[in-house]
Image (cartoon, helix red, strand yellow):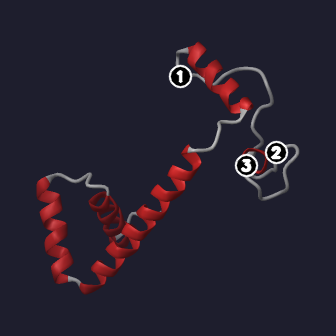
Amino acid sequence: MSDGPAARRWELLSSYVDEALDEVAMAAVDRDLRRHAGMADDLLALRRQADALRGWAASVNDRPVPPGVRALLRAARAAGDGSPPTGGTPPAPANQAAPGTAPGTAPGLARACP
């Protein structure tokens, strides 16, 4: 992502949707929304995206956690120092498919999500 004005605008609108801005920044975004008609369209798009993501997250939350993931989480908790668990198969590099997955598939995604 770039650091230009457009990127900053999206960042501000995203924080506005998440209600993560302080009162002064919220008021500034409200003012800009009244002044710039296109900004309202962008805000609506971000709100729709946030709603869709919440719906997706709720559906994922209802799925059981795969046993392999549970084992990794238990190992990470047991380590207690925030370091990744040792042992098992290391993740594949980002430009290479993990064993047992098709190229372009996120490692483990095909197996974890039906």
Q: Nearer the viewer, mark 2 or mark 3?
A: 3
Residue name at image x 73 percent, y 30 percent: 67
Mark 2 and mark 1: span between their CA atoms? 24 Å
Q: What residue type is disc 2 on?
A: Ala
Q: Does residue 65 sit above or below 31 in this rendering?
A: above
Residue annotated with mark 2: 98
109 in relation to 76, above or below: below
- Residue drawn at 34 percent across, 81 percent down: 41
Q: Is residue 9 left or right of residue 93?
A: left
Q: Looking at the picture, which amino acid does disc 1 mark?
A: Gly
Image coordinates of residue 109 in percent, x first then y, are 73, 49
User: Is 105 placed left or right of 57 in the picture?
Assistant: right
**Do callouts 2 and 1 mark residues in contact (Cβ within 8 Å)?**
no
Sooner in the amino-acid sequence: mark 1 or mark 3: 1
Q: Which residue is mark 3?
A: 109
Rendered position, 35 above or below 112:
below
**Label 1 – label 3 distance at C-alpha:** 23 Å
Q: Give amino acid for label 3.
A: Leu
* Quadrant of the image occupied by residue 108: top right
Task: Answer few, some or many: residues within 10 Å of disc 3's Cα (few below 14, many 20 plus, some between 14 and 19).
Answer: few
To which residue does mark 1 refer? 82
How many marks the image carries: the answer is 3
Asked if marks 1 and 3 touch (Cβ < 8 Å), the reply is no
Coordinates of residue 62 in the picture (x, y in percent) = 57, 44
Contact between marks 2 and 3 (CB within 8 A): the answer is no
